[in-house]
Image (spheres, grey):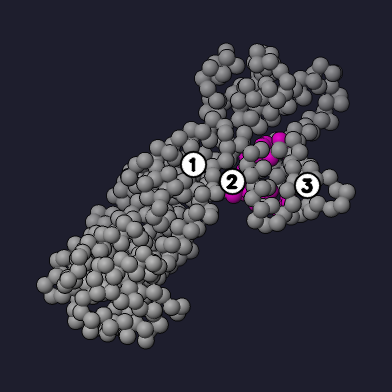
Amino acid sequence: MSQLDVLIVDDEESIRNLIAANLKDEGFNPKVAANSTQALKILSEKPVSAVILDIWLQGSEIDGLGILEIIKKRYPLMPVIIISGHGTIETAVNAIKMGAYDYIEKPFNNDKLVILLTRACEVTKLKRENIDLKSKVIDKTELVGECSVTLKYKMAIAKAATSSSRIMIHGKVGSGKELAARLIHKQSKRVNNPFIIFSPTCMTTEKINQELFGESEKQANNKRPTILEFANNGTLYIDEVSNIPIPIQVKLLKFLKDQTITKPCGKNIKIDIKIITGTSKNIQDEVNNGKFLEDLYYRLNVSSLKVPSLYERKEDIPLLVKYFVKQLSKFSGLKERSFADETIAALQSYEWPGNIRQLRNVVEWTLIMNPLTTGNNDIIKPYMIPSEILANSANLTKFEDSFDMLSMPLREAREVFERQYLSAQMSRFNNNISKTSSFVGMERSALHRKLKLLSLHIPPTNRINDEEYEEVNA
């Protein structure tokens, strides 16, 4: 263990010296103070990893609770362990409500103090790492896109962030449910507290139980903090919540009711967290099939957020490709490349069952498999992307009836070409008349007439707005 600075504040010299000697033997670097003046001076010179604080300080200008209040304001993550006598337990409990990590009653066992102190430092270290990670990753994580679907989605996330209610995020695999949870946390009042991700997928029931509640048949005296403790005062995101087994669902439901967990030692710990869950399944179907508790579903789904699929956001693909190329260049050392317009068109024509995640993988695969060499054009052409993407894309450069068109009169062949071409372009731009007309070089009114002449209709479920739908299909 690297030496951790620990401040011991106690008015009794014999007690603070005894604690200091014991902690030094355990590898800590103890500092001692007899009153508030000494304690605050030491902290102002150099913050410590933890504080052991007596409640009653004879001859001190500020008592223990007053020092605790100052510490929590100046150093909110610094753990404070309260030393209490037999007659001060109620005060010690109040201290915990004020932000103290825990309390230990006199006379105390040195081993118990060391375990408590080690655990407090470990929890704080993880909280700091989480905040550091958030500053490096979450702040650089953004929802890329400017299409109407994405703009509405961004507004929904912002609205969800203002609510203290639990949120269930619904979306297909790879659509970005975790990103939505991160953005909700980032825009919420809990932004400076932990954001913890828990994925029960592929975990055994016992492992999930141990991670969430600290209960384990193999480790009856498990001292390790639980996921719920790590997330205290912050946000917990549970990915694919439907994968939690029924026995654990029962315990989770109980926790949601009283916001308290009971450690194996019998100690109750109050937890204050915002819970966000994600699912790619229809939870109502899981409830109907007896695989998910109905009461738990209603408690988790207080507020609902739907993540649009990439197919619904295909207009964002050019921006997403640029974003992924820059990210891969920065973090993986891959050379920045431009994707040709026809390549982007092919990507926009694909249905993307794996959504954003699949698109990122395709961009990465393309850059890796097509290294830039001397004299090589840095433009990514359609033939450079995975063949299955091209094979399953709507054809923009060749047509199903190309051989039959050789036997057609020019007028009839032109009609076949126009129907397939405009159908593909409408699909590419998510049936947006304005953007399609701009790309193909036609006036909106001319495109309207052409679509009607070719009997091409915008499906009601995919149309951009009622005005365009009525105008085209009139």
Residue sitting at x 33%, y 55%: 233
- How many numbered circles does the render carry? 3
The residues bearing labels 1 and 3 have C-alpha atoms spaced at a distance of 30 Å
Q: Which mark is residue 307?
A: 1
The quarter of the picture where the C terminus appears is top right
Determine the secondary structure under disc 2: helix
Above or below, comparing residue 110 to residue 303 in the picture: below
In the rendered image, the vertical position of residue 16 relative to residue 313, given as above or below: below
Task: State the predominant SS element of the stretch in magenta.
Answer: helix
Q: Report x, y in % for residue 275.
A: 36, 52
- Please state if 418 lies on the left or on the right of 116 as rendered: right
Residue at the image point whose x is 19% and y is 81% from the top: 107
In the rendered image, which residue does mark 3 sit on?
A: 384
Name the side, left or right, on which 132 lies relative to 404. Answer: left
- Residue that mark 2 sits on: 356
Provide the secondary structure element on which disc 3 rests.
Answer: helix
Which quadrant would the N terminus be assigned to in this image?
A: bottom left
Tell me where residue 58 appears, x and y as whole percent.
Answer: 16, 72
- Residue 183 appears in view: yes
* Residues at marks 2 and 1, CA–CA distance in whole angstroms: 11 Å
Find out whether residue 175 is within the magenta segment.
no
At a point 58% along the width and 45% down the height, the residue shown is 355
Disc ID at residue 123: none
Q: Quadrant of residue 414?
A: top right
Please report whichever mark, 1 or 3, sits nearer to the chain's N-terminal start: 1
- Name which residue type carries label 2: Ile
Q: Which residues are magenta?
A: 345-367
Amino acid type of the residue that numbered disc 3 sits on in the rendered structure: Met
Q: Compare residues 463 and 129 and report the one nearer the observer.
A: 129
Q: Nearer the viewer, residue 42 or 330?
A: 42
Against 387, residue 79 (above or below) is below
View extreme (left): residue: 87
